[in-house]
């Protein structure tokens, strides 16, 4: 999951993942606040971002950890355990997209959904209208059969990369301040995406964005 976002975020994520296993008082970069959910099981935690804009909160079950929390990117990672495989949820604000060559950056299209649907390196398997955290948008389940990894868009903290033989669920959301992209993937095990979706969907449904 951590190599999905390259460059800056990857470094921060690795550090946070390590410190999460050590001293709870040690902080690196933005940190999400975790409190027990008011009416949930003991394993369900309420996570509030302290950095992402707009502010967001969600309820996450066992095995999920907030590993990145910055103004432009929020990442939850699920390590493989009895509840499900390795995977993650990335919420970000794209600042630029990459041309088909994966090198040249271009402005974010006003209609990011249409841009992704017409991208020659992506195959859209399903499209649905969605509402997440009060923001309307479109869900795209996509696949990529490219033989090498390639860059899709740039965030304030790094580059979102699509890997070879990848499968990703994107939810592109509109609202105040511009488009937000939420993605769910199964890290380096794309054939297990459905299993990750089963444990990620309740989290996505619980997301609340500040208006």
Image: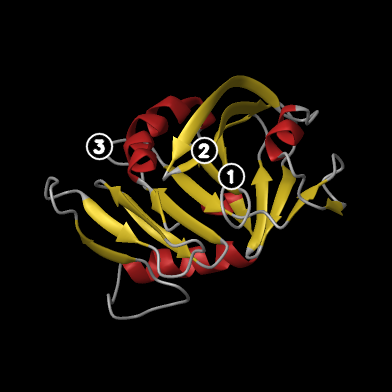
Give how far across and how far down residue 85 sits, in percent: 37, 36
Q: Residue 146 appears in which quarter of the rendering?
A: top right
Q: Which residue is mark 1?
A: 174
**In the rendering, which numbered label is found on residue 82?**
3
Is residue 94 depicted above or below 32 in this figure? above
Give how far across and how far down residue 187 sits, in percent: 51, 41
**Is there a contact, CB below 8 Å, between mark 3 and mark 2?**
no
| Residue density around tag 3, few if under 14, some if 14–19, many if 20 or more, within 10 Å | few
Q: Is residue 1 visible?
A: no
59, 121: nearer the viewer: 59
Give the structural element (helix, strand or loop) at label 2.
strand
**Is there a contact, CB below 8 Å, between mark 1 and mark 2?**
yes
| Residue density around tag 2, few if under 14, some if 14–19, many if 20 or more, within 10 Å | some
| Residue density around tag 1, few if under 14, some if 14–19, many if 20 or more, within 10 Å | some
Is residue 26 depicted above or below 33 in this figure? below
Q: What whole-number distance in Å separates the C-alpha atoms at marks 3 and 1?
A: 35 Å
Q: Is residue 43 left or right of residue 101?
A: left
Q: Which residue is mark 2?
A: 136
**In the rendering, which numbered label is found on residue 165?**
none
């Amino acid at each position: 999951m951590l190599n999905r976002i390259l460059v800056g975020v990857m470094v921060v994520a690795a550090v946070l993942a390590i410190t999460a296993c050590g001293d709870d008082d040690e902080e690196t970069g933005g940190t999400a606040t975790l409190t027990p959910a008011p009416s949930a099981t003991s394993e369900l935690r309420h996570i509030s971002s302290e950095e992402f804009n707009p502010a967001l909160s969600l309820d996450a079950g066992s095995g999920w950890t907030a590993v990145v929390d910055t103004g432009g990117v929020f990442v939850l990672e699920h390590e493989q355990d009895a509840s499900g495989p390795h995977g993650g949820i990335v919420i970000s604000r794209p600042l630029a997209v990459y041309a088909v060559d994966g090198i040249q950056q271009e402005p974010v299209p006003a209609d990011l959904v249409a841009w992704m649907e017409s991208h020659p390196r992506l195959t859209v398997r399903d499209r649905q209208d969605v509402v997440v955290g009060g923001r309307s948008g479109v869900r795209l389940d996509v696949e990529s059969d490219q033989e090498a990894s390639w860059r899709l868009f740039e965030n304030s903290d790094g580059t979102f990369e699509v890997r070879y033989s990848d499968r990703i669920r994107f939810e592109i959301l509109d609202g105040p301040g511009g488009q937000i992209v939420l993605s769910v993937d199964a890290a380096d095990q794309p054939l297990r995406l459905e299993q990750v979706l089963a444990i990620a969907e309740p989290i996505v449904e619980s997301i609340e964005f500040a208006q």
